[in-house]
Amino acid sequence: MSHLAAAVTIRPMMLADLDRVTAIAQSLKEAPQWPRGAYVAMLDPEGRPRRIVLVAETTGSGVVAFVVASLIPPQAELETITVAAESQRHGLARQLYSALVSELKNSHVTEVQLEVRASNQPALALYRSLGLQQTGCRPRYYAEPEEDALLLQVSID
Ligand SMILES: CC(C)(COP(=O)(O)OP(=O)(O)OC[C@H]1O[C@@H](n2cnc3c(N)ncnc32)[C@H](O)[C@@H]1OP(=O)(O)O)[C@@H](O)C(=O)NCCC(=O)NCCS
């Protein structure tokens, strides 16, 4: 485990995190560019579908990564894992995913699915290292730039 990963706390995202979270997303072209209101809605415990939204925080840098998943048990959709550029390749995405899966299992989820841009090689490498396998392709699913979406899934039961 790297020095950074040893000092990481993973906890639910809070409204107070949103300035930092949206700044991280805006700094990464591969990250989802959701408006602040979308995050506010995700954090609403009464919102549907229910979401699990976690951040990774380090003692030195504060919030440096986050994960969002929507739940329709027994399935969940991993909507994003995003790690600030300066904190990548320290195992944070792997740690966030592990924490997410623990919560998903507690919520009776047995299968995780996601869509990813076909060109997003870091994300594809991450997902494959986590055991996800490609199950399909949606041609020209993404815009700006137009690109195929690869569909991946993994059983977590
Ligand atoms: C994809 C992303 C989340 C990975 O986060 P990370 O914290 O750097 O990933 P980790 O350090 O946990 O890496 C775990 C494994 O994933 C793979 N991986 C991650 N980044 C990689 C890269 N740039 N190149 C190749 N493999 C990579 C490796 O197998 C790695 O294990 P290793 O370091 O032992 O070789 C990060 O690059 C990111 O935030 N990208 C921009 C946003 C994005 O594309 N999110 C996903 C789609 S919404």
Image: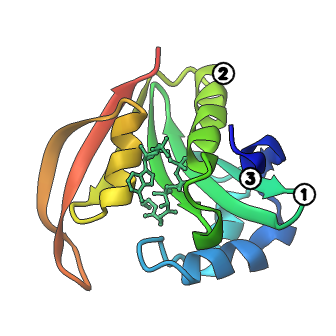
Residue at the spot 60% in from the left edge and 32% down from the top edge: 98
Residue extending farthest top? 157
Where is residue 119, by image quadrant? bottom left
Quadrant of the image containing the N terminus: top right
Q: Is residue 14 above or below residue 145?
A: above
Task: Label 1, secondary structure: give it.
Answer: loop
Mark 1: which amino acid?
Thr
Kindly report which numbered mark, 1 or 3, lies closer to the viewer in this rendering. Answer: 1
> Which tag, 2 or 1, sits closer to the chain's start?
1
Residue on which disc 2 sits = 106
The residue type indicated by label 2 comes to Asn
Labels 2, 1: front one: 1
Relative to 126, say whether 142 is above or below: below
Q: Position of residue 18 (x, y in %)?
A: 75, 73
Q: Residue at x 56, y 83 (%)?
A: 26
Residue bearing the label numbered 3 = 56
Residue 82 sits in which quadrant?
A: bottom right
Q: Is residue 59 left or right of residue 5?
A: right
Residue 23, located in which quarter of the rendered image?
bottom right
